[in-house]
Image (cartoon, rainbow, N blue to C red):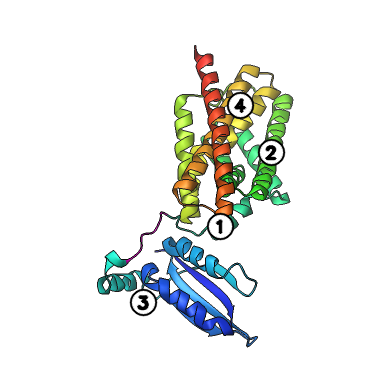
Amino acid sequence: MALRVIEIVTPRSDKDEVKKSLEEHQPDAGYVFWASPLDDEDSLSFRVVLDVAETANVMDELEERFAWTDKYRIVVYSAEATLPRLDKLAMEEEEDGDSSDKKDKSVQAAVSREELYADVLDTSLLSRHYVMLVTFSCLVGVIGLLRDNVAIIIGAMVLAPLLGPNVGLSLATTLGDMKLARSSLLTLAVGVLLCFVLSAGVGLILGIPEMTHELSVRSMTSYSDIILAMVSGAAGIITVTLGVPTSLVGVMVALSLLPPLIAGGLFLGAGMFPEAGGAGLLFAANIICLNLAGVGTFLIQGIRPLSWYEKERAKKATIQAALVWTVLLAALIGLMFLKTH
């Protein structure tokens, strides 16, 4: 069972209020907590140890009560283990209490909204390291496609620098966060442009000595590619919200954002325009399906703003984005239909 620690730094004068709030929700969430004095003699630190699945609900309750004022600081971090086990404590409380008296909880993501936002933000910011990662991933992908080497291509997929900005864009849409949306779009645009220019340059200089199998399969788009992109995108978002980054490797390989983009650049540089168009169509399908599935999965996972006015803004942004991605997907399917008939 994955665990989280929520630390609440509060003035000593508010000790009773914080303790009362934590005790009110303790039977439902099944957590343990304690208070410790801090060195400044004016503050206390409450530490709450809980199952990661309860983090979102507990954080919402704490944010409603405490996060709006500068007197408090709430920090979330991982915990490896605790004794006695929390699942045993929760079972004992469930046996002692009446389960019918417990309030119903809406479906929530495993990690809290704030923890998810921090994780996604790290991969959505444009930085020197991101540019280097895109460059190296592109070069690895170029070598793999030209040599028809699946293992090398998988290496480029696992690096997956374009996945983070797309996840950031989906989360920004769900939360109505324009700052995160602009940052994600800028990072994604720079990554796509850099990768395409590099691969087109290689295609212009070296050409394509022979049409390898790995290149040919990325010069066309089928309806199964759309289904794969939708399912992989949804699986990726679930993996992110569960806080299990190691499971994301399989999603990176299945979604395959870089190879069709690199193939499109190689084809264009070599003057193979029909093949370049087919690869570009496949890349566009992956981007569209990833974002459409991302927005839907975030909503199903219960990722929403806390305040009512932010919810209204987020609802409007989500509807607009969903319409845009749906129209783009319909246009893409239409192009595929015309191309095959």
Q: Which element carries disc 1, helix, strand or loop?
A: loop
Q: Which residue is mark 3?
A: 84
Residue 260 location in percent, x, y? 58, 30
Q: Which residue is mark 1?
A: 307
Real-space Cα distance between discs 1 and 4? 40 Å
Q: Residue at x 44, y 38 (%)?
A: 231
**Left or right for 58, reference 135:** left
Real-space Cα distance between discs 3 and 4? 55 Å
Q: Residue at x 55, y 28 (%)?
A: 327
Given residues 157 and 332, the one toward you in this image is 332
269 w.r.t. 251: above or below: above
Q: Which residues are magenta?
A: 102-107
Q: Residue at x 51, y 79 (%)?
A: 17
**Left or right for 214, reference 135:** left
Amino acid, disc 4:
Gly
Instruction: Give the foreground label among 1 and 4.
Output: 1
Residue 166 location in percent, x, y? 59, 42
Residue 186 location in percent, x, y? 70, 43
Given residues 251 and 50, the one toward you in this image is 50
Q: Which residue is mark 4?
A: 280
Amino acid, disc 3:
Pro
Density class for disc 1 (Cα within 10 Å; few <14, some 14-19, many ≥20) is few
* Sequence-earlier tag: 1 or 2: 2
